[in-house]
Amino acid sequence: MESRVLSAAFLVVALTAVTACESSGDGKHTASARPSSTAPRMRQNSVVGVVGTSPGTKAVGTPSTARVVGLGYEFRLLGTATPPVVSTDQGPRQAAAGQRLLLVRYDATGSLGGQSDSNTPGLTKRATLVADGTRTVLSPDALPSGHDETVAMSVAENAHDLSLEIETGDLVQSLSLVTGERSGADPLVLYRTDTDNQDATGFPSVTAEISKRLSFPFALISSNGQQDTFPDGKYPTTIDVEKAHLAYTLTQPDNELRFPSSPDKAFLTLDTQVTGGNSWMTALPTKDFVLTTDKGQKVPAQRFDDPGLRTGDLQDSDNAFFGGKVYWEVPGDTKSATLTITATKNHHMGGLFNSSMLDYHNKRQSLDIQF
């Protein structure tokens, strides 16, 4: 009789222990999982790192949707769980009073916090925990970067909408910790599968190898309107195009970032070197550089002008022929494009023959770009 009583008592204890560890399959904490632990409580809406063996997490969403790619920061949600207590480097912790724990497992590259360097001064990157509209800006070290990191968040007990908002500069994106779905601005170019390179700012970009030389013979027209016999095509301007880049931002001459007009757009730029006739420092108008996308859209060039362009004296020899840094705003999913350069005539920008006009005789050259 005594052994039956002991067995029944053991069964009750075992069932109680199992019930205390239960959580619902949808990631929401069930009433039976309310912690009865004496572990110290976290502050409301706070985040702590988890050490040791973590409770099993359940995948949320899909690998393609449960991620945020920002500017200099990427977050991938691997899974969540709702344990009553977690282990931290300060000992066990439970949620704040009236709240529950949400365990979040993730990968992250880059860093949060303010960034100020020669490429992107003042670019702010931060994460905000949003629970049914209540916003809590997290400290930069709340989500350490690394592979398979785990943190515990203390969130409102009955919160239905839990998300992590990632802000990198002017780009704000939100990732649901419940469904793994992303919302907000969704730059096409940042989520392309071929973004395996980084642009000059360190942000994801798509790069195409080109390595093609374009030649533009020219004649000199004197101030009296007569064409000189020299050089008359003997020393053409040579353009070596090495690479093409597709990126979401451009760094302006003042080091501020320029963003495209909408998230579905991107900027296309070229790596070029100008030799030969660049000793005359000519600068053609932007209308001479027209890009045609793979969907047949003709895109005019835009340009960050060389500081000396208006005064007729280019300050940077790298800006010869183009007159500065030229770029095109194109659809972010552009796979291919054709650049057509129709070199017209222009007054050269100083040098030995500073009173003459450079005439390229409308020489046309085309360049195919394949991403």
Image (cartoon, grey):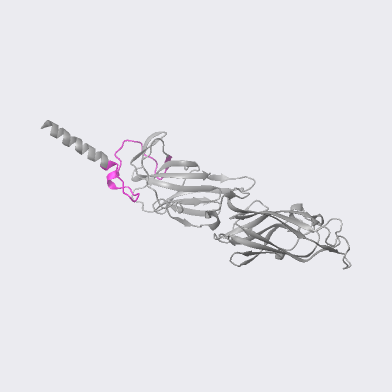
Image location (x, y in percent) of residue 106: 45, 45
Horizontal side, residue 1 vs residue 310: left or right: left
Q: Nearer the viewer, residue 95 or 349?
A: 349
Image location (x, y in percent) of residue 253: 68, 53
Image height of 321 relative to 42, above or below? below
Q: Is residue 316 visible?
A: no
Q: Is residue 297 visible?
A: yes
Tag count in the figure? 0
Quarter-wise, where is residue 279 in the image?
Answer: bottom right
Q: Main secondary structure of the magenta part?
A: loop
Identify the residue at horizontal 65%, vertical 56% (top origin).
Answer: 269
Horizontal side, residue 339 vs residue 65: left or right: right
Quarter-wise, where is residue 267 in the image?
Answer: bottom right
Image height of 23 relative to 304, above or below? above
Image location (x, y in percent) of residue 193: 53, 53
In this picture, which residue range is highlighted in magenta?
19-48
* Magenta highlight on residue 291: no
Quarter-wise, where is residue 306 in the image?
Answer: bottom right
Quadrant of the drawing holding the N terminus: top left
Horizontal side, residue 240 vs residue 222: left or right: left
Q: Nearer the viewer, residue 128 or 194?
A: 194
Horizontal side, residue 95 vs residue 276: left or right: left
Image location (x, y in percent) of residue 110: 54, 44
Q: Nearer the viewer, residue 1 or 341?
A: 341
* Magenta highlight on residue 44: yes
Identify the residue at horizontal 27%, vertical 45% (top origin).
Answer: 32
Quadrant of the drawing holding the C terminus: bottom right
Residue at the limit of the structure toward the top, as seen here: 2
Identify the residue at horizontal 53%, vertical 58% (top origin).
Answer: 188
